[in-house]
Image (tube, helix red, strand yellow):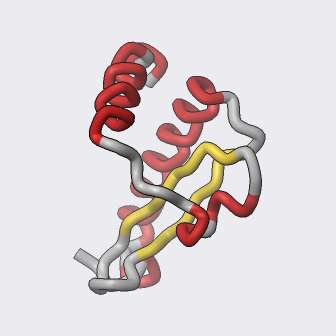
């Protein structure tokens, strides 16, 4: 575990970002957004995690503009994404 992505060994970082690229391609295919954004975070607790987001506007990158999904919305999204898993 690393405090920031800058602490990651180069080969591990490259594998991590390659996985993010595959996820982004999947999201692009499934949701056909205007853009797929990537944000590397980890403010609350020192760690590395990436948000790969299908976006319709740049303002969607700001979590202040986000609202949590309901349990039902998450369940529907899970079923939908699993139905598209052949694209991965």
**Which one is nearer the viewer's eye here, 67 or 33?**
67
All told, the count of numbered labels is 0
From this view, report whether residue 56 is shown above or below residue 33. Answer: below
The quarter of the rendered structure image containing the N terminus is bottom left
Instruction: Please state if 29 lies on the left or on the right of 23 as rendered.
Output: right
Q: Residue 76: horizontal and vertical position, in percent?
A: 36, 26
Residue 12, by quadrant, is: bottom left
Instruction: Please state if 10 lies on the left or on the right of 71 as rendered.
Output: right
Residue 46, by quadrant, is: bottom left
Residue 79, by quadrant, is: top left
**Which one is nearer the viewer's eye here, 66 or 15?**
66
Q: Name the residue located 44 percent from the left edge and 17 percent from the top edge.
A: 84
From this view, report whether residue 25 is shown above or below residue 84. Answer: below
The quarter of the rendered structure image containing the C terminus is top left
Q: Name the residue located 63 percent from the left edge and 33 percent from the top edge.
A: 28
Q: Name the residue located 73 percent from the left edge and 45 percent from the top edge.
A: 56
Furthest-left residue in this view: 1
Q: Name the residue located 57 percent from the left edge and 24 percent from the top edge.
A: 30
Q: Residue 27: horizontal and vertical position, in percent?
A: 55, 34
From this view, report whether residue 65 is shown above or below residue 17. Answer: below
Q: Residue 22: horizontal and vertical position, in percent?
A: 50, 38
């Amino acid at each position: 575990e690393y405090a920031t992505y800058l602490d990651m060994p180069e080969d591990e970082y490259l594998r991590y970002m390659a996985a993010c690229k595959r996820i982004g391609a999947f999201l692009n295919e499934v949701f056909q957004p205007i853009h797929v954004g990537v944000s590397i975070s980890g403010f609350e607790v020192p760690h590395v995690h990436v948000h790969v987001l299908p976006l319709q506007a740049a303002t969607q990158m700001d979590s202040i503009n986000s609202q949590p999904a309901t349990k039902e919305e998450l369940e529907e999204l899970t079923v939908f994404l699993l139905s598209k898993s052949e694209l991965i």
